[in-house]
Amino acid sequence: MSGLRSARVSLLLPRSHSLTDANKTGSWSFIQPRYGDKTAPCGEACPCAEDIPRLESLAARGLYAEALRAVLEENPFPATCGRVCFHPCEARCNRAELDGAVAINALERFLSDAARDAEAPSLAGSGASGSGAGKRVAVLGGGPAGLSAAYFLARLGFSCELLEAAPELGGLLRYGIPAYRLPPEALDRDIERITRLGIAARTGARVDASFLAREAAGYDAVVVACGKSRPERLALPGAELAGDALAFLAAARADSAPSLAGKRVAVIGGGNGAVDAARTALRLGASATILYRRRREDMPAFADELRGALDEGVSLRELRAPASLARRGDGSILLAAEPMRLAGIGPDGRGRVERTGSPAEELAFDAVYAAIGAAPDEAWAIPASSLKLGRCAIDLAGSPPRAYLGDLASASLPALAESVADAIGSGKEAAIALDALFSKGPGRVEAEVERSRVGGGPSVSLGAYLGGERGRRSRRVVAYADLNPDYLERRERELGPELSPAEAARGFAELRAPLSPSSAIAQAERCFSCGLCNDCDNCRTYCPEVAVRLSGGRRAVDTDYCKGCGICVTECPRSAMSMEEPVS
Amino acid sequence: MMRVLEGSQAVAEAARLARVKVVSAYPITPQTHIVEELAKFCSDGSLDGRFICVESEHSAMASVIGAASGGVRTFTASSSHGLALMHEMLHWASAARLPIVMAEVNRALGPGWNLWMDQTDSLAQRDTGWIQLYCEDGQEALDSTLQAYRLAELVNLPVMVVLDAFFLSHTYEPVDEPSQEEVDRFLPPFEPKFRLDVADPYVLGEVAPPYIYMEMRRSIQSAMESALCLLPEVEEEFAGIFGRRHGLVDAYRCEDAEIVLAMAGTAASTARILVDELRAAGRRVGLLRIRLFRPFPAQAIRAALGPARKLAVLDRNCSFGAGGIFAQEIRAALCGHAGPAVYSYVAGLGGRDITVESLRGVYEATRDRPEPPTESVWVGLREEILCE
Amino acid sequence: MRMTERAGEIREYLSPGHVGCPGCGATIAMKLALRALGERTVVVTPASCWAIMVGAYPQSSLKVPVLQTGFATTGAAASGLRAALDLRGERETTVMGWAGDGGTFDIGFQALSAAAERGEDFIYVCYDNEAYMNTGVQRSSSTPWGARTMTTPGDKWKRQQKKNIMEVMAAHRVPYAATASIAYPEDLERKFRKAASIRSGLRFIHLFSSCPTGWGFAPDKSVKVARLAVRSRFFPLYEVEDGTRYAINESGELPVADYIGGQNRFKHLGSEEIALIQARVDEEWERLKAKAAASPIGQ
């Protein structure tokens, strides 16, 4: 038996011993796919340069804290902006071409609530220049611009001292925006997160121009973020009878406004301040009328805000220019309003008006508030030699160097929508500019800021400045036509439920309830993630060559095996890949 | 234990005793008794295996290929047209080096339809890489089936155990059926040299490009050569346990024979009667029964023929345009060696009887002709019908 | 349509370095099928493109065992293998027959039908690229009406309808039959997992596998073409339980012209012929819908 068992018999048969991966079939290809994230239009439009597709993709996975940290990377005011931002991102959202923009703004608010304990992201290990270490910066003004500058400077390692004239931080956000748009609690959360970075904030500390002369030498840089502290006055007979709308709003915020029950209130102006004042008056029991010189569509106020006001019962008298105010015997104010008519369209697209010549209309009110804008104090005039950036100006020659921010700077900078988000963006731009100044020198400031812009600008990204993944994205903005239509499925846009106008007008409760978690995820899932890989994994799923490798959360094409079929690029829903000739 | 068994039953009993796991077959007369018996064994639990009722012989072979690739002992049986339909998969089984055992009942191919004995079906498969064993009686059918598994699993080639239609498949004879314990001693549990295994995945039967195909073919040829050496050893072991051996060839009274009759299958039993008769009359006649056809036992044949001057080969088959197949093979084996002149006879096709008298005619014709004719001589042919 | 994350480790059983054409749909099909079935799977594959793509000696492109077998024999070889595994106590191993349309609709049909009738316990996949591609694009009984192949060339383009293999298999009353497409990976993987979980008979999956080489379209469009086949109802995704209960999983409302338009094999067809195809597709769709309505899965 043993003889047979040990019999040696030839047995060479068609049986495999190894895998085909020894064959480098990548040599078949003459063109290869590349991963290349591009710029989403929303992110380009966001004055704070939030990485919107990224945060949406995190939110869609239920990673709320991570999503909020992605917001905080670029914007320290999520709870605030999630409520009051005019969200130009949504106006540019590619989804709008299909079935309505992604509810980016509502989602930001949702995240700010859902992950309220999230801290500002650390820059440790991020490649932060560290030039701020040991440097002291005085930030003058505790509004959104100043707080933003302090936030980003602190994250870059600077020691910040923030001086605010008012008793509390927040500036216009605290005193100028009614609670039904921005509950104080939401603002406080944002501000606390900022000050927790170690910013020394001194409130009730009014500074004037002499500060620069007396104390600036003690700092390495000064950020001037004083805002427009000087309200414009009406120039007409009886102007002194009109109150300042901003002061009225501040009083209402502080619960010190007089009761207006049964009173008739007029607000003169066409901006957000006018609408806010009218709606606040309404909530205090008054009947409210907005008088505006031009047409409704020419009003700078956000259309949604105006519509809300009108729905609540505010009256709008467009094409009415106040000519005079006079106190009547019964204590009421007689407002003479001259009818106006359209006299062409200005270069900004808004209508220009002229008097019709018809007799003035006489209207009786119990109170009149002027909301015709504000101007910066002359004390903060920007030296002509300053370097003008997108949203701030840097006086490099100043001793120490100074940055002029936001609304303050905008008077002499390219016209920008004057918004909270713009103010925040200006603070960030200044922080980046100062960091570049100290780390790279004055000659590099402009280039470093330019390098940090998103898409075509003007928004700047700290992530891009720090040389992170954001900075490596192509600045080409993804258009709707760049998306793969096969993956564009209709899904309803959804916002939180809204109070009825009648309910809304009854008090200062927020107009809208937040998104529910399921709606928030559904909305986040609607994001196409234009130009930004969101791990949909189509490239890996469909690759016939198993040549898409995932390692450390990043995908790469294994050129040893990629035959260049191009399925990954074609099936990328969001234009985050492209075909390129291989580099030999 | 001695039992009276039909030839088909003897094969089925052997398959049962070999503990086959998968039997797959499609019915064709005269193979049916074999597979019916095995179906019964699977059904009554006397065989722990599965009988797959396939829809064709092609599938029968494919399914035992699948099963053997899965690492179990397999069995199938066929005949004639069924075997011809299997042809592709016969090649597959051998080149895949699977130790499948098949009973093949020699039956004529149509048209005209013919159910009876004829060897052309199995001999037409001679180049498929199967070992072929031709049996003379029920005992040998049982023994050959057991030996077939032993040999197949040693050399990793499939084995065809060939039985004459009806003369063997349907004939009852006393057969010494061994016990399971004895068979287990001879035939150890199947340990496949390779099998499909998720724990050690590989491809079986894959593409073999020109650079390796010839070596694989040579490996089959080498294994066939090994089988030729190993069958005697298997027989030794078999004889040690069961006391029987059948040989590569079975030489009967050939020692001093001047004329030897050569053939395969049951006709040899008839020839033994004639040989005994002629020997009694003082004629120096012998019988050479070819048992192993593939690999062809050329040396054993030469050794067995001794001093014979004439060899009359009786073929129950015909390779049209060439004649009797055994005769050709034997001629080739003798070529270049001193040996007898080969006389080729075609006889008994499609179940026509081969009798002592018809064999006597073959003997006498061989004796009387000084030189063999170049063509095969057809025995008992009704020339008058052909001439019309 | 998945728009969000799928970033975890995925065990692949297809190895790179195989010899499939760039953009081969059948490769994606195998990759996805094995993702769903996992390592306890044995593949049985007859002559086909996949017989080549499995690899030449001594290589394999699959990380699971593969039995190559004769063209006509997938159903039979898989039956034998299943029996062997069962008798070895390897019940949990899935046997997957993997044949092309030629090996299924044509030469392998008899063995498939028999295995279905016997209630064999394995998954039979027909990866359908609608012609004999491995031999250089000859027509099969799966080639659709209107298509040109090397054996239906020029004006002799195919004028016979594609065999409705799903109905044939449903008529066998197999416990599970489903269509699947490489363009719908989640649906595909679900169906493979479901098929693996059913052990009461043969499970049949008709897997649409686009072929850039044979159909004449750019390799990057493989998935897109497969998707268009579904969205134009040329190849709706549905499943049939026990041959009687239907559920439609994916379809669409695009005109078949959208699907046909991008493929050279159809480019000779005029609007009249395309209208005929549309009518046929509509008719089949109505028939399918009626079945799904009359006898839905889950009732």
Image (spheres, coloured by chain):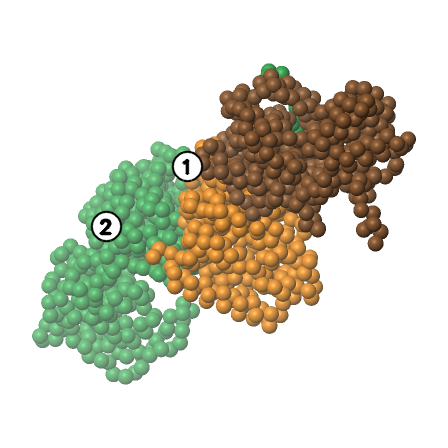
Residue sitting at x 19%, y 75%: A335
What chain is colored brown?
B
> Tag 1's secondary structure?
loop
Spot the residue most to the left: A330
Mark 2 lies on residue = A186
Q: Dot 2 falls on which chain?
A: A
Decide: is A444 above or below C209.
Answer: above
What chain is colored green?
A
Residue sitting at x 56%, y 59%: C163
Mark 1 lies on residue = A126
Q: Earlier in the sequence, mark 2 or mark 1?
A: 1
Spot the residue most to the front: B281
Q: Dot 1 falls on which chain?
A: A
The x and y percentages for residue A342 are 35, 77
The x and y percentages for residue A65 are 31, 43
Pick the front one: B335 or A467: B335
Pick the front one: B267 or A55: B267
